[in-house]
Amino acid sequence: MANILGTDEADILNGTAFGDVIRGFDGEDLLRGRDGNDRLEGGDDDDTLDGGNGADILRGGKGEDTILGGGGNDTITDESGAEFVNAGDGHDFVNVGENDDRVVAGTGNDTVIAGSGNDTVDGGSGNDVIDGGEGNDMMTGGAGNDRMTGGEGDDRMIAGNGRDLLSGGEGNDTLHGGAGDDTMTGGEGADRFVFTSGRDVIRDFEPGDDQIDLSGVPGINGFGQVFAAARQVGDDIVFTFASGVLIVEDTLRRDLDSDDFLY
């Protein structure tokens, strides 16, 4: 194991084939972990950290950093927010801070906590957990069975091909069901639920406040067609369309009107 230290200038620091500790300190540094289970710490300026192979710990520090996890199950944190994170392969944990960050989780079953900025998170493949935190966030689940939580702010969540769970939290959120069988909960605020295909469930639709977007459903262009596709099953409404089934829980068919839908 090597202990590699930078200076107050802009340094290029390369690790070895073993588990190294690399600290950049001040300056806009480039840190490369290469092989081994490394620990990389960027310092105060705008740094680039590349973990390489291995289960690495990467800490960006205070600048607007670019962090590349590489192969392995990595832990990536940045106290003031990274400009860009690509976690790479493996089952990674990513926690970014205050800035408007862009995170690509990559392959594997990843956990991403986005922080307080207006963040963009792409879950990639795998069964991912994404927490948008504060801010107006954009989250894409990708492949796999994902769980996305918006938190505060007006968030947008797009499910992929799996069985995804979308929870908007506070704010006026937009939840896209995707191609799989998804469950959507808007939370507080006036939310928009987008259905295209699959067998989706809306847990907390509020007529008059929320809207259901059916613009991607073939053959639907007016409220009459929507109402004809709906039937009351106990406490729920079940819509049967050519492209799939939408279940709206704890809602009465008679309470719906045209303003509750987008075509």
Image (cartoon, rainbow, N blue to C red):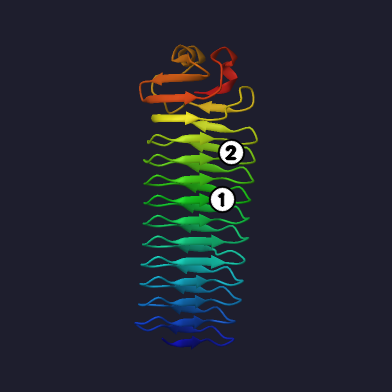
The residue drawn where x is 47% and y is 73% is 49
Compared with residue 141, is residue 207 higher up or lower down, i.e. above or below?
above
Q: Which residue is mark 1?
A: 132
Residue 71: x and y in percent read: 36, 67
The residue drawn where x is 54% and y is 51% is 131
Find residue 18 and report its image quarter: bottom left
Circles 2 and 1, Cβ within 8 Å, touching? The answer is no
Residue 50: x and y in percent read: 43, 72
Q: Amino acid at mark 1?
A: Gly
Q: Please tell me how crowded label 1 is: few (under 14), some (14-19), or many (20+) other residues with Cα within 10 Å.
A: many
Residue 189 visible at all: yes
Res 173 label: 2
Identify which residue, 47 or 175, lies in the foreground.
Answer: 175
Which badge, 2 or 1, is on the more N-terminal residue?
Answer: 1
Query: In the image, is 78 to the left or to the right of 38?
Result: right
The residue drawn where x is 46% and y is 46% is 140
Residue 196 visible at all: no
Res 88 label: none
The residue drawn where x is 50% and y is 35% is 184
Compared with residue 165, is residue 8 higher up or lower down, i.e. above or below?
below
If the image is split into quadrants, where does the N terminus sit? bottom left
Q: Amino acid at mark 2?
A: Asp
Compared with residue 68, is residue 138 higher up or lower down, i.e. above or below?
above
Residue 205: x and y in percent read: 57, 27
Q: CA distance from mark 2 to mark 1?
A: 12 Å
